[in-house]
Amino acid sequence: MSAARRPLKVAIQMDPIGSVNIEADSTFRIAEEAQARGHSLFYYLPEMLSYQEGRVMARGQSLTVRREQGNHADLVPVEEVDLAEFDVVWLRQDPPFDMFYITTTHLLERLMPETLVVNDPFWVRNFPEKLLVLDFPDLTPPTAIARDLETLKAFRAKHGDVIVKPLYGNGGAGVFRITPEDRNLASLHEVFTGFSREPLIMQKFLPAVSKGDKRVILVDGEPVGAINRVPAEGETRSNMHVGGRPEKIGLTDRDREICAAIGPRLRDRGQIFVGIDVIGDWLTEINVTSPTGIQELERFDGINVAARIWEVLEAKRAAG
């Protein structure tokens, strides 16, 4: 450990650690790097977060990780801790971005600025991934957000081939391509609106997706690299959750242009680890809730993104 680095107390709010794929999960890699740098780890599930008489508490377990699938986490007996006693708290559970998720951001926000919460929960709450891109219309494909069926029909009539998906979904779930010949838009609308009050998002279909949906990773507003996610045969979705294949790829001038436009806003609002999605020349999502891809990037290009993230966090804690 360098003389300038002090051990940090780190809490991680995440989904069950026992089921993660240690060869792909970004949270596991972040925890592994923290441990290697001498920081201590505490793990808890989001449902174990609470507010009690002025304190933000969590019931969870001290954690030690190792790169051995199925035996990758040593956990001590459950204890309740005051999260204000930690240096860093990671907000790393996966969406859906529902009221449960939003409530955790309200509670974690109460720890700041004394405790560093990553990513900043105020802006996670106000930067939903499919909405933040609306601030950059010159970088994004034609987009509509609506619950009204006639509005969606009009957008589809104008652009022909479109993608429709839940506004607050994740991992490729509920993503449909509607071609000009497809007659299922009204039926899909009926299904979606039958179980949710949320609007839908519709975007012009980008044929370049057949060559891949690029995940560009930014650390503190700066691009550090990218991986390409290629859809499986016969699939429109490229998400690795649904069979997309990760491939090595570099950053283009257009990727850097996009990052230069959005990076300062992300950095200024405490979004330290972000993954953006780029199809062809177009920005489609800015993922701030629980981005992934750092293990694939490390394998392909030898870029230790987790170390870069911790360098930023250590510097912020050292600065007070």
Image: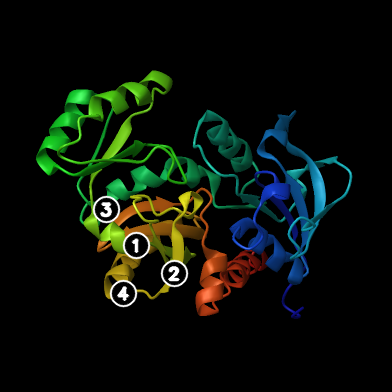
Q: In this view, does 47 lie to the left or right of 161?
A: right
Q: Which of marks 3 and 1 is nearer the N terminus?
A: 3
Q: Which amino acid does label 4 sit on?
A: Thr
Q: In this view, does 36 lie to the left or right of 137?
A: right
Q: Is mark 4 on a helix, strand or loop?
A: loop
* Labelled disc at residue 247: 2
Q: What residue type is labelled 3?
A: Phe
Q: Which amino acid does label 2 sit on?
A: Glu
Say which of marks 3 and 1 sits in front: 1
Residue wearing tag 3: 136
* Labelled disc at residue 212: 1
Residue wearing tag 4: 252
Disc 3 crowd rating (10 Å Cα; few below 14, some 14-19, many 20+) is few
Quadrant of the rendered image containing residue 190: top left
Q: Earlier in the sequence, mark 1 or mark 4?
A: 1
Q: Residue 235: where, in percent of width, then height?
A: 35, 50
Give the CA distance from mark 4 to mark 2: 15 Å
Give the CA distance from mark 1 to mark 2: 9 Å
Query: Considering depth in this image, is 301 or 317 the residue closer to the camera?
Result: 301
User: Which residue appears farthest toward the top when viewing the image?
Assistant: 194
Q: Earlier in the sequence, mark 1 or mark 2?
A: 1
